[in-house]
Amino acid sequence: MKKSILSAKEISKSFAHNGMQQHILSQLDFDLYEGDFTVIMGASGSGKSTLLYALSGMDKATAGVVRYKEKDLVKLGEKELATLRHTDFGFIFQQMHLIGNLSLFENVAVCGYLNKTAGVKEVRKRTDELLVRMGLEKVKTHLPSQVSGGEQQRCAIARAVVNTPKILFADEPTGALNRQNTIGVLNLLSELNENGQSILMVTHDLKAALRATRLLYLEDGKITGELSLPVYDRQEEKSREAQVNAWLASLEW
Amino acid sequence: MEKWTILKANIRHKKGSFAGIVILMAVISMVLLSLLGVWDNISAGITDAQERGRTGDVLYLINKNRLEGKLLSDVRSHPLVKDVKTVETLICDNMVYQDYKYSNPVFLQEVRKSGRLFHSGGTGYQEKTPELKPGELYISRGTQTNMGCRTGDTVSFTFSSGTYRFKIAGIMEDPEFGASVIGWKNVFISKRDYDKICKEVMQTDTPEQASALIMRVSVYKTDDCQLSDVKFARQLNLDTGISDMSVGSLARSTLTNYTSLFPKIICMVLTVFALLLLAAVIIVVCHSVSTGIEMEYTVFGIMKALGFQKRDIQVILAAQYLLAEAAGILLGVLPAVPLCYALGNIFWPITGIVPRKAISIEKGGLLLLLALAVSVFCIAVIMRKIKKITPVAAILGGKNEIYFDSRIKIEINKKMLSSTLAFRQFTSNKKQYAGMAAIAAILVYFMTSMMILTNMVNVRSSWSAMGIMDSNLDIYLSSEKEVTEEQIKEIEKTIGENGDFRISYKYCGNYNLSLDGEQMMCSIFEDVQYIPGLLKGRLPEYENEIVITEIAAETLDLKIGDKVTVVCKEKKAEYMISGLNQHVNDAGMNFSMTMEAASRIMKPGLAFLGYIIEDETQGEKTADILNKKYGDFLSAEYDDQVDVMYQAAVYAMTLVVYLFSAVFAVVVVHMICSRAFIRERRDIGIYKALGFTSKKLRLQFAIRFAIVAGIGAVAGCAAAAVFAGNMLGRILRLIGISQVDTVLHVSTILVPVIMICTCFFLFSYMASRKIKRVEVRELVTE
C-alpha cells in the first residue's frame, strides 16, 4: 500500500481573461505517493503546469484543498510557503531560471543556506557532492551565461535537491534542451527516483514520460487517465514506449 | 503624426519615471529661479535705495576741522568728479540700549527729508514720514538687529557734554550703513535735538570737541567716468589725498557688497547646491535613457522592422525626456514667484532694505536652457546605442541581461545571506549603479561641506586659523588713561586667580589707513604673535614690515616682498610685505602691523585685550571682578555665545540642504528602484521559488541600494576632503575667508554618510514593496 504524501481534493483554478472566467482546473482530485515518479501529460493548454504550480504551492488554487503534512497549502501564508520551498519541496523549471550573477556552485548553495537546519559546511559539502554527481565540478565557478543549457539544467536539478526535498517538482525540465542534454537530465531524475526521491513532473515529451512509474493524463482540467509502470529500465525502453503510446492513443492524444 | 502617437504612448506607459524627472526639474527650477531672483532683487533694492538716498559713489567721513577748504575745492575741481555733497554729523562711541553698549561708532544727524520709514514687517514703506519730536529718533533696520531694540524703546548716547536719551520712533531706510553687517551706524534725530547736542558738545573743553563733528562727504563721479567706484576712490586719493585725511571712506560698490553680503553667501551656497542637484538630475535622465534603451530593445527593434529609422527613434526618445524636463522647469516657475518674495523678506533684518519683487527669468532661464542643452548632448551620446539594435536581434528575444565575473567578489555567506547577495547584485552590474553612486556622492559632498561650514561656526578653536579673533572675555581699555604693562600683568593675574586662560589678542584697534592710495583697514597689534591667520611668508620681524590679507594682496596685485606706502593723515612711511594672512575684518580687505611698526606713522595705544577663559562657568564672575577692581580704566565683558544669527543661518542652510537631499533621494531612489524592479522581476520570481520571502528580498534590494549609497558616500567624503575647502573658500571670500580649514571630524563625515545611506535604504525598501506582487507563476513557460 503506497503512502500518499501530497493530496489535492476538488481543486479548481480559474483566471479572469478579458472579463471572462477561464476555468483551467475543475474540481480535480489527486494523490502523490511516496517514492513515485509521477508524470502528468496532456496537450498544450490542458492545465498541466497550472496543476503542478497549484500542487507545489507556487500558486494558489481558486478552490479546494491541497494537503501536505496535515496543512492546506492553499491557506498557508507567504512565510510558511517559503519555508516549505527550501525544506520539503524542490522545483525545476523548464527555463532553468538560475540566478545570473551567481556561479553554479552559489546557485545551489544559496538554496541550501536558506535551510536553517543545515550548517554551512554541510551545505557546501552537499553542494560539491551534487555538482560532482551532475558532472559540473569543472564548471562550478562559472556563471550560468558561461555554460551550456544542459549544464544549466543539471545545476537547476542540483539546486532543487540540495535540501533533500520530500517532493521534487519538475515543469518540462527538458523542454529547452537538445536531445543529448535531455537524456542526461532524465537519467539524473531516474537516478534520484531510484534513490527514493518522490518526483512529480509535467511534460508532453514522450521520452521524458517513459521515466514515470505512474502516468497521469490531464484533459480540460481533469485527470482522464492513469497508467502504472515499473521502475524505468533502459533495456526495456522500446516495449515501455509502445505501452505508453498505446495508452496515449486510447486517450486520443 | 506617427512620432507624436508613439511619444504620447511612451509618456503614458512610463508615467512614474517621467513624473520623477518632472518633480526633480520643478524643484531645481523653483530653487534656482528663487535664489537668482533673491540675489538680483536685493542688489536692485540696494541700488534703488541708494538712488533715493542720493548715496555718493564714494563716501568719506572726515573730521570737520580737517576738512580744509583747499581739500574740498581740490576734490570739487577734480576732472572725474561731478558733484560733492557734505553733511555734518556727530560721532558717538557710546550708544547704549538697556545693558548693551554698541561697540562701533554711530553718526547722529538730522533726519533726511528723503528718508522713508518701513512698515513694521519690512514689506514696504510708510506713505509719510512723520516729523520727529524732541527726544525721538529713527534708527536703521541693521541697528535694530544688532541692538535687539524695538520702536518705543529708549537708547542713550553719551558725549563729553552728557548723556542724551531718545525714544525710537521708527525704522528708517538707510542705504549707507543700514545693514546689520556694517559696524558703523547712522541714527536720525530732529534738527532741534541735533543743534542742541552739537552746541553742548562744542561747549565742553575736551579732546572730543575737536573730533565729535564728522563731515560726511559724498562724492559723485562724472557720467563719463569709466573707473569703478573703488578705482575712482583710489585715483581721487592719489590726486587729492582725501582718503588719507578721512576717518574712513567707503565706495558705493563696497557698501552694496557689504549690505548684500549675507544673503549673497546664502544664495551662493544654495545655488551651488542647486547646480549640483541639476547635475544629478542629468545623471538620472542619462541613467533612465540608458536603461530605457536596454529595456525597450525589442520594441525599438520592432519599430525598425516597421520602417522607423534610427533618427526617428532618437527624436522620440529625446523629445519625451526633454518634454519632461521642460514641464518640470515650467512647473517650478509658479512656486518660485512667492518663494522669491518670501526669501527676499527674510533677509530684511540683515540688509535693511526692501528688495525688488521680480523673478530672474533671464538669468534663471538661460541657466536652465543651458542645462537642457547639456541634457540633450548627454542623451544624444547615450542614444548612439540605438544604432546597434536590429530587427532580427529584437525579434530573437531582445537583449538579455548578461553577467560577467567581477574582480570584486565576496563569497555568498549563510549568516549574511541578504547582504552578500545584495553585494553580488551590485558588483555584477556595477555600471547600472554608477549613476546612483554619483548622485549619492554629490549629495554627501555637499552635506559634508555644510557640516564643515557648521563646524566653522560652532567650533571656536578653528576660528583663529581663519583670521577670526576669538575670545570670550573682552576687555576695552579706556582711551583717557594710559594703561601700563604692570597694570596688564595685574589684570591677567586676577583672571588667572579664577582659572586657566589663554591670551587671544592684545591690540590697539582698527584704523582706516591708506595703503598705496587705497583706503584699507589696518589692525594694529601689541605684538606680532597676536596677528591672526598667517597663510604664506612670515610674520613681521622688523618695524618696517606688515602682513596683508591674501584677498587684499590679490585685489591690489601685491606679493610678499613688495614695498608699500602707508599713510595716516599727514604722516607716511614705507613698509615691506613679509607675509600674507587671512583676517575677516572689512571682508578680508585689511592689513596688520605691530604697535612698533605703527608708531612710525601714528601714536597707537593699547585699546583691546581678548582672553579665552577655559572654565566657562567662571567667565561672568571674572568679568565682574575685573569691572569692580579696575572699572576706572577698563570695561570687561564675558560672552561665550557664538553669534546666534549666523549660527541660525548656517543651521537653516544645513537643514535646507539635508531636506532637499532627502527629497532628492526619495525621487531618485524611487525612479531607479522602479527600473531595477522591472529588470529584475524574473530574478525576484526565482528567489521566491527558492524560498526567499518578500521581506527578505526587499531587504536584499534595500541593502544593495545602501551599498551603492555607501560607495557614493565614500566618494563624496573624499571629494569633500579635496574640494570642499576650495569651494567654501571661494564662497567665503566674500567675508574675507579665502582658505577654509577642512579638517574632517568623525561627525562631519558620519552624519551625511549615515543620513544618505539610511535614506537610500529606507526609500528603496519602501519602493520595493512591489516585490510582494511578484508571483512565482510568472516563471511558467506555457
Image (spheres, grey):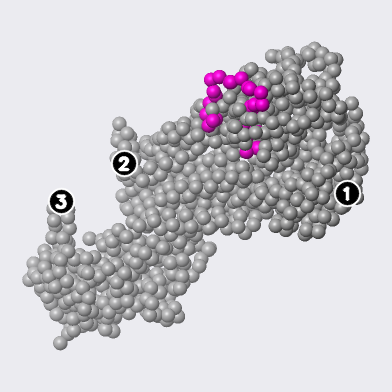
Q: Amino acid at mark 3?
A: Gly
Which contiguous range is marked in magenta? Answer: B120-148
Q: Amino acid at mark 2?
A: Arg
Tell whether position B499 is magenta. no
Question: Contact, CB < 8 Å: mark 1 with mark 3?
Answer: no
Tell whether position B139 is magenta. yes
Q: Residue at x 46, y 40 (%)?
A: B27
A167 left or right, relative to A10: right
| Residue A190 position (above or below residue B242) | below
Residue B210 in sight from this viewpoint: yes
Image coordinates of residue B389 in percent, x first then y, are: 38, 46
Residue A241 in sight from this viewpoint: no
Image coordinates of residue B641 in percent, x first then y, are: 66, 49
Residue at numbered disc 3? A19
The circle on residue B460 is: none
Given the image, what chain letter belongs to the residue carrying mark 1? B
Residue at numbered disc 1? B487
| Residue B700 position (above or below residue B678) | below
Name the magenta segment's main secondary structure. loop
Question: Contact, CB < 8 Å: mark 2 with mark 3?
Answer: no
A211 left or right, relative to B84: left
Is label 1 or label 2 in front?
Answer: 1
Image coordinates of residue B472 in percent, x first then y, are: 73, 50
Q: Is circle 1 on the same chain as circle 3?
A: no
Q: Residue at x 67, y 33 (%)?
A: B155
A54 left or right, relative to A163: left
The circle on residue B12 is: 2
Between the C-alphas of marks 1 and 3, the distance is 100 Å
